[in-house]
Image (cartoon, rainbow, N blue to C red):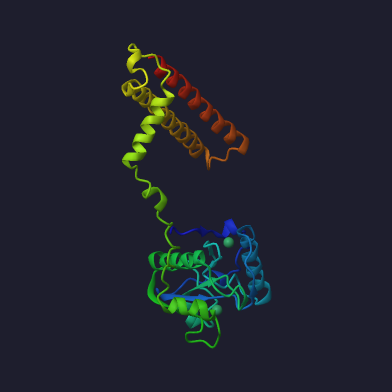
Amino acid sequence: MALKLVSRSAWGARPYRTPNGATPYGRARRGVKLHYLGTAYSDRPHAQCAAYIRQLQAQHMDGNGWSDIGYSFLVCTHGYVYEGRGLRRRNSANGNTALNEQDYAVCLLVGSSGLTKPTDAQLDGARDAIDYCRREGPAGTWLGGHRDGYATACPGDAVYAWVKKGAPRPATSTPPTAPAQEDSMAITDADARKVAKMVLTMDGVIANPNPATAKTNTHIALMTAVRNIETVTRRSEQQIAAQSAAITKLASLVGSGVDTDTVVTAVRDAIRDAVIKVDVDITQNQES
Ligand SMILES: [Zn+2]
Ligand SMILES: [Zn+2]
């Protein structure tokens, strides 16, 4: 899973106070230490997560008197990783200066009551944060919790058990059940004969130069069926082309700051242009 990093500006962080908030790490970090909130927490829509992070920052700066939010990173239940003090500035969450210097501090938004178990998306996000710290920090491979070397219940039993197992990626949800019905629908000879008979019956009206074989000339009927199948196939292919054109158009607009109406109009035009092309092509095919 790709790291979903939310920068300080993206979550609306206040500027940190100097000089303490700007203290750089003096050496490479041993590893990553995990935390939890240690208060009641209830899950919430992701749209409210940034506000919660801002509230934590206010608590740390105005309540604790720290120069910034204490953690290096925070991970919401939806797997997003919020930049706290980040990779370069020393955190203030591990208990004392030596411990802060030693390891990064990553906090999972789970509580000591309410929501106490991390979600799978959150474990994925926490793993992303750990990998990010190791790759970009630098941080070594040590993993643990706030309670390692400090008297606290943090990061709670669930997160602690997970990190002490090496912070594994959560088992992916059971793979979608195999399309058993589809596989078991192999066409039997009897089915094939039934289909052939239906085609023949439907196409029985086709004029046949020899009236004696009009009802039994499967050759004419099957040629008609093949043409119908070809038409349907071409239509599907053209629909896919229309969708691809629309998606390409949309992708070219995303991120360029255009307003929604412009995007919708452009996509609608792209679909209409492709659909007109489909109609023309099919008409030509039938007439040839
Ligand atoms: Zn902690
Ligand atoms: Zn969230």
Instruction: From the viewer's side, name the closer residue of 259 and 158.
Output: 158
Residue found farthest to the bottom: 151
Residue 19 visible in this rendered orientation of the protein: no
Identity of the residue drawn at 54% across and 58% down: 7
Q: Quadrant of ligand 2?
A: bottom right
Instruction: From the viewer's side, name the closer residue of 38 and 199.
Output: 199
Quadrant (top left, top right, bottom left, bottom right) of the N terminus: bottom left
Residue 281 visible in this rendered orientation of the protein: yes
Identity of the residue drawn at 61% across and 68% down: 17
Residue found farthest to the top: 209
Q: Position of residue 180 (x, y in %)?
A: 40, 53
Q: Position of residue 9 (x, y in %)?
A: 58, 57
Residue found farthest to the right: 62
Q: Position of residue 43 (x, y in %)?
A: 62, 67
Give the number of callouts. Answer: 0
Left or right of 178: which side holds 253?
right
Instruction: From the viewer's side, name the closer residue of 105 and 98.
Output: 105
- In this view, 255 is above or below 67: above
Instruction: From the viewer's side, name the closer residue of 97 and 207.
Output: 207
Q: Position of residue 282 (x, y in %)?
A: 43, 21
Left or right of 77: which side holds 59?
right
Quadrant (top left, top right, bottom left, bottom right) of the C terminus: top left
Identity of the residue drawn at 55% across and 62% down: 78
